[in-house]
Image (tube, rainbow, N blue to C red):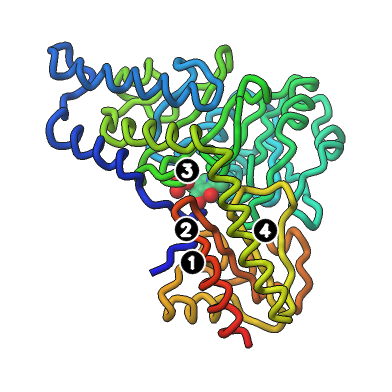
């Protein structure tokens, strides 16, 4: 099998897996208990928080462990909404943000949607025009999950602050893949999900800057300094810290490798004479290749690639039951002739050059 759907999820790193087994089987104490066996787990949490904070330029007390990116997004949007008059987000967000915003809208609060250009980029000037004098929460994704486009986060955060707003970013596709320093970028809240950077599924975190006023989303015990109740998933947290450190220590090398693989795929497709558009912008998550083929059907391509034991997708994994043209492809105005023939190849650090060759060769054979 060739796995080329790393934007949907990634392979667990071996050392992260080793840690999980250790903490599931042997060091399984509850971190809230004061006996030594529990305190061992607490020490693991302290270490993991420090490691994760170090990877994104945060302080350890600003990291709150959650069960996934979706929970982090829901927390930021639904609890963040309590302090503001309006939410401003973009039209190409993941459904974790869009549907959380819909829930907020249903309570009578205003939600406004920034449009994007045909590369999927938000225009910061649009935010200036939209924000007005209302107390706002601005939430714009760091990198899009379908086309990989990286948004101008520092500028959007600056505009938000100049207008007294709080700035959140859904960085689920970016953390562990591009350099991020939350303090330098001026981010107030940031969502991340372990399984997108070679950690297990079902673990994530929300970064909340010191001084940002946000109520807990889960009520219950005193875990996470009283901010996120629920017994900590120590094994997954330790694995997440390990995998994030692995990725962040090798960011430049991984990016170089992935850009090389992208080039292999694109050159081979160009030389084949097939008519296609590459969606997204030059500033994108390394390895993300979103393509629209003329007079083709993304679903058909996906299933024929599957028969060849190659995993790719047509867009967001969370949308696999809905085979219509995605909201992202609509937003960037892919011409009708091409829109239905859209696929996403998302390469990861474990993919090889020969796999990239095979992916391109299989696509060419299927489409021809
Ligand atoms: N946000 C983005 C941009 C995503 O790509 C995803 C997952 O695909 C999520 C949020 C949801 O993350 P999780 O699967 O951890 O709930």
Find the distance from the CA under tag 3 to the CA under tag 4.
Answer: 18 Å
Which residue position holds label 2? 351
Quadrant of the image for the N terminus?
bottom left
Please name the residue shown 33% across and 32% down the image: 237
Query: How packed is label 1: few (under 14 Cα within 10 Å), some, or many (20 or more)?
Result: many
| Label number found at residue 70 | 3
> Mark 3 or 4 closer to N-term?
3
Q: What is the x, y in percent for residue 190? A: 56, 31
Which residue position holds label 1? 355
Which residue position holds label 4? 328
Residue in the foreground of this view, choosing between 107 and 297 = 297
Q: What is the x, y in percent for residue 100? A: 55, 43
Which is in the foreground here, disc 4 or disc 2?
2
> Mark 3 or 1 closer to N-term?
3
Find the distance from the CA under tag 3 to the CA under tag 1.
Answer: 31 Å
Label 3 SS: helix
Residue in the foreground of this view, choosing between 356 and 150 = 356
Which is in the foreground here, disc 3 or disc 1?
1
Does any atom of ligand 1 lie closer than 8 Å to the CB of label 3?
yes
Which is in the foreground here, disc 2 or disc 3?
2
Label 1 SS: helix
Vertical position of residue 69 compared to residue 4: above or below: above
Q: Quadrant of residue 45?
A: top left
Badge 1 vs badge 2, beta-carbon distance below 8 Å: yes
Q: Residue furthest bottom?
A: 368
Find the distance from the CA under tag 1 to the CA under tag 2.
Answer: 6 Å
Vertical position of residue 148 compared to residue 26: above or below: below
């Amino acid at each position: 099998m060739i796995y080329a759907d790393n934007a949907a999820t990634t392979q667990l790193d071996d050392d992260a897996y080793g840690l999980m087994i250790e903490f599931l089987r042997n060091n399984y104490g509850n971190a809230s208990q004061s006996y030594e066996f529990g305190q061992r787990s607490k020490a693991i949490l302290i270490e993991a928080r420090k490691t994760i904070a170090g990877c994104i330029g945060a302080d350890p007390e600003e990291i709150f462990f959650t069960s996934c990116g979706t929970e982090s997004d829901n927390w930021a949007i639904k609890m963040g909404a309590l302090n503001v008059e309006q939410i401003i987000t973009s039209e190409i967000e993941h459904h974790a943000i869009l549907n959380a915003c819909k829930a907020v809208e249903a309570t009578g609060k205003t939600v406004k949607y920034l449009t994007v250009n045909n590369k999927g980029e938000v225009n910061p000037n649009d935010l200036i025009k939209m924000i007005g004098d209302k107390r706002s929460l601005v939430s714009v994704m760091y990198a899009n999950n379908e086309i990989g486009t990286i948004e101008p986060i520092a500028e959007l955060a600056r505009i938000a602050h100049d207008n007294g707003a709080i700035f959140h970013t859904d960085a689920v596709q970016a953390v562990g893949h591009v350099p991020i320093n939350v303090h330098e970028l001026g981010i107030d809240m940031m969502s991340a999900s372990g399984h997108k950077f070679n950690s297990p599924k079902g673990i994530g975190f929300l970064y909340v800057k010191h001084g940002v006023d946000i109520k807990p989303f889960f009520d219950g015990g005193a875990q996470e300094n009283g901010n996120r109740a629920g017994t900590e998933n120590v094994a997954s947290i330790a694995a997440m810290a390990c995998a994030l450190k692995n990725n962040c220590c090798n960011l430049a090398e991984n990016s170089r490798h992935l850009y090389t693989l992208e080039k292999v795929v694109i050159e081979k497709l160009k030389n084949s004479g097939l008519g296609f558009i590459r969606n997204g912008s030059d500033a994108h998550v390394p390895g993300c290749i979103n393509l629209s083929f003329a007079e083709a059907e993304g679903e058909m391509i996906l299933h024929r690639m599957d028969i060849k034991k190659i995993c790719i997708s047509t867009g967001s994994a969370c949308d696999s039951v809905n085979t219509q043209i995605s909201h992202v492809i609509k937003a960037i105005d892919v011409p009708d002739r091409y829109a239905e023939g859209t696929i996403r190849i998302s390469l990861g650090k474990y993919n090889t050059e020969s796999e990239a060759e095979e992916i391109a060769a299989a696509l060419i054979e299927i489409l021809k």
